[in-house]
Image (spheres, helix red, strand yellow):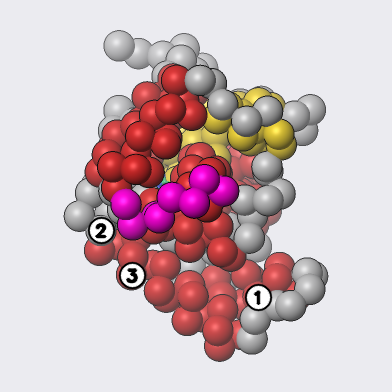
Amino acid sequence: MSRAKPVIAIDGPAGAGKSTVARNLAKALGFVLVDTGAIYRAVALAATRAGVSRADEPAVASLAEDLLRREALVFHRDADLGMRVLLEGADVSDAIRTPEMGLGASEVSVHPKVRAALLGLQRHAGGSGGVVLEGRDIGTVVFPDAEVKFFLTASPEVRARRRHAELMLKESAPSFEETLAQVKERDLKDETRAVAPLKRAADAVLVDSSDLDFDGVVEQMLTHVRASWRG
Ligand code: DC
């Protein structure tokens, strides 16, 4: 079944610039943006608040299922085409953006039952096309039939430098070495998990942002989207 407008999948490791690039690409095309990492982060936050261990697969999965059933985990678009996440009616978009919830998301996302619980939500958000989804397994699992797929990466050092610069804007930033260690730890977790590990889909275009600024990356992607999709 072909869509009037494409589903664009952007996968890649933490700190490659996916969020900025996906947001700007969606804006340039007038597409909706879906940040799937935010969904895993929100589940990690909900588990923390409920006192549920992230290692407890059945408990985290039933927590996620319950949130979805009650429509207590939802997202909506803000004027800037960004995505806001609401948990139990409260906007947690900033609360989930901490290194702690990044690691928490990585921990809850290893569980197949948790991933299965969140699949429908992601497919529902993107199914009709005209959407940019960013995550780890969009091109491989969530939308293997996406019309356009990118795998955005950069060296661990470049990614750690970017993340560190971001964290320096806040209080109590970790050292660069700690940040680099965290980046590598998360890569290893995401790449080695049994279900839906972070890996490039065979048909995904590889984009390396180590030596390109994000505007350059978006330009490169726009050129590819326009060449492959003439809507
Ligand atoms: O993109 P992010 O840093 O917000 O993602 C946080 C974690 O969520 C990431 O380390 C792994 C997990 N994740 C996932 O398993 N699958 C996705 N599609 C998106 C994120």
Residue 117 rendering spot, x and y as whole percentages = 34, 32
| Mark 1 / mark 2, whichever is N-terminal | 1
Quick one: which residue is furthest to the front in this view? 51
Question: Which of 61 and 143 lies nearest the eye of the viewer?
Answer: 61
Magenta residue span: 49-56
Comparing 112 with 132, the one in front is: 112
Does the numbered disc 2 mark a residue whose Cβ is under 8 Å from ligand 1?
A: yes
Q: Residue at x 71, y 49 (%)?
A: 94
Q: What's the residue at 55%, 84% (across, down)? A: 178
Please report contact status of discs 1 and 2: CB closer than 8 Å, yes or no: no
Q: Residue 164: which numbered mark, if any?
A: 1
Callout 1 secondary element: helix
Find numbered disc 2 in the image and state the secondary structure of the residue it sits on.
loop
Residue 17, quarter of the rendered image: bottom right
Which residue was labeled with disc 2? 193
Above or below residue 19? Residue 175 is below
> Is residue 214 among the parts visible in the rendering?
yes
Q: Sequence order check: which comes first, mark 3 or mark 1?
A: 1
Residue 52 is a magenta residue: yes
Which residue appears at 35% of the width and 34% of the height?
Answer: 62
Residue flagged by tag 2: what amino acid is it?
Arg
Q: Amino acid at mark 3?
A: Leu
Which residue is at the front of the view, 201 or 160? 160
| Residue that appears at 56% across and 26% down | 72
Please tell me whether residue 41 belongs to the stretch shown in magenta. no
